Amino acid sequence: MPGITEEVFYEGGPHWGDLAINLLLGLTVICLPLTAGAVVRALWLRYRITNRRITVIGGWMGRDRSDVIYSEITKVVTVPRGWGAYGDMVVTLKDGSRLEMRAIPRFREIYDFISTKLNPAAKQVSGAIGS
């Protein structure tokens, strides 16, 4: 659409606290898989939230990309982690698929921004768990 620009609300990677906590947990052998996951997220996971869409770039070497437009979202659920410093968000789409976003900094602020873009039915079923 001509004249409509895409304005970025948030662009960046996961919260540094996720990596720090998992590195500490990595000192125990049993938590090494969690540590490896946190390192991969810190290196290659990037979020971009705009007034038109949510984009998640991740996977090994940042090769996977998911774009979601707000009209396709039926539900958004957040879960605080890291003593509330960051959180996880699960976006459910009309086709039933889910997009999980882990260790999002400013997740409450980002959730509020996303909820303003949702239709009324999606707003009603969305919310925070554990707040």
Image: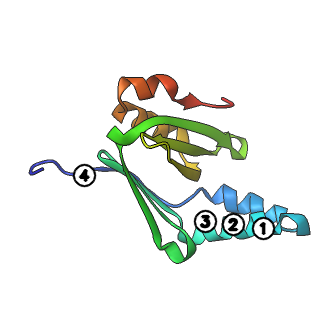
Asked if labels 3 and 2 touch by Cβ distance under 8 angstroms, the answer is: yes
What kind of element bears circle 4? loop
Image quarter of the C terminus? top right
Residue extending furthest toward the bottom? 61
Mark 2 Cα within 10 Å, few/some/many (few <14, many 20+)? few
Expressed as whole percent of the image width and height from the top left, the position of residue 66 reads: 43, 59
The residues bearing labels 4 and 3 have C-alpha atoms spaced at a distance of 26 Å
The residue drawn where x is 37% and y is 32% is 118
- The disc placed on residue 41 is 3
Mark 4 Cα within 10 Å, few/some/many (few <14, many 20+)? few
Task: Say whether residue 126 is visible.
Answer: yes
What kind of element bears circle 1? helix
- The disc placed on residue 37 is 2
- The disc placed on residue 6 is 4
Q: Is residue 45 left or right of residue 117?
A: right
The residues bearing labels 2 and 4 have C-alpha atoms spaced at a distance of 31 Å
Q: Is residue 64 above or below residue 6?
A: below
Query: Residue under circle 1?
Result: 33
The residues bearing labels 2 and 3 have C-alpha atoms spaced at a distance of 6 Å
The residue drawn where x is 33% and y is 39% is 71
Asked if labels 1 and 3 touch by Cβ distance under 8 angstroms, the answer is: no
